[in-house]
Image (cartoon, rainbow, N blue to C red):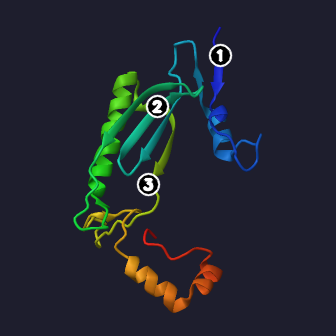
Amino acid sequence: ETTLFPYTTLFRSHTHPGRIPLAAREMNEKRFCMFDGGSPMPYLLGIDIGTSGTKTLLVDAEGRKIASATVEYPLHTPHPMWAEQDPGDWWQAVMMGVRHVLAEAKIDAGQIAGIGLSGQMHGSVFLDAEDQVIRPANLWCDQRTAEQCAWITRRATEKVVHEETLNPVLTGF
């Protein structure tokens, strides 16, 4: 017997448990996957663009790991307290990781029902007028603005900075 798997079980509302988001309900009305081998089973893809590399994970609808890949890239420190990376390295690592897990799992990209993304905290990627990267990205762990952060804190006072922003002035922001 064929069991129909509604896509809505792939989507759970964190703000309203038990409620299925509208987009998921609409998908549910249109698409089901069969687990009888006749139709492709849905998969979920997770991509984490981290400081040391990009991790890619493919899981099935039950959350079981199907395939994974890690593609590393360099962290550049051209001067003391600087931390930079080439955003092009991130993109290449994403493409390599996705290709690897699809090949390892022997599935078609069309079988992926959803993609989750995460990245390495905050950083600055500088673009020109044509949206092209113009220099390496400054990473969250870059400390080159320590002097400027100290100046801002002294000038505004730590009390005012905290009252206005609820955060200290930090080098990585």
Residue drawn at 50 percent across, 77 percent down: 169
The picture quadrant where one finds residue 126 is bottom left
Direction from residue 41 to residue 17 in the image, left or right: right
Q: Mark 1 points at which residue?
A: 3
Direction from residue 110 to residue 159 in the image, left or right: right
As helix, strand or loop, the secondary structure at mark 2 comes to strand
Label 2 to label 1, Cα distance in Å? 22 Å
The picture quadrant where one finds residue 168 is bottom right
Say what amino acid the circle numbered 2 marks: Leu
- Is disc 1 surrounded by few (<14), some (14 to 19) or many (20+) residues within 10 Å? few
Label 1 to label 3, Cα distance in Å? 40 Å
First in residue order: circle 2 vs circle 1: 1
Q: Which of marks 2 and 3 is in front?
A: 3
Q: Which of marks 2 and 1 is in front?
A: 2
The picture quadrant where one finds residue 75 is bottom left
Residue drawn at 48 percent across, 39 percent down: 46
As helix, strand or loop, the secondary structure at mark 1 comes to loop
The furthest residue to the left: 78
Number of numbered labels in the structure image: 3
Say what amino acid the circle numbered 1 marks: Thr
Label 2 to label 3, Cα distance in Å? 20 Å
Q: Which of marks 1 and 3 is in front?
A: 3
First in residue order: circle 1 vs circle 3: 1
Q: Compared with residue 114, is residue 64 higher up or lower down, i.e. above or below?
A: above
Residues under numbered marks 2 and 3 in contact, where contact means CB atoms less than 8 Å apart: no
The image position of residue 153, as x and y in percent, is: 51, 84
The image position of residue 7, as x and y in percent, is: 62, 32
Say what amino acid the circle numbered 3 marks: Gln
Q: Mark 3 points at which residue?
A: 120
Q: Name the residue under label 2.
A: 58
- Is disc 2 surrounded by few (<14), some (14 to 19) or many (20+) residues within 10 Å? many
First in residue order: circle 2 vs circle 3: 2
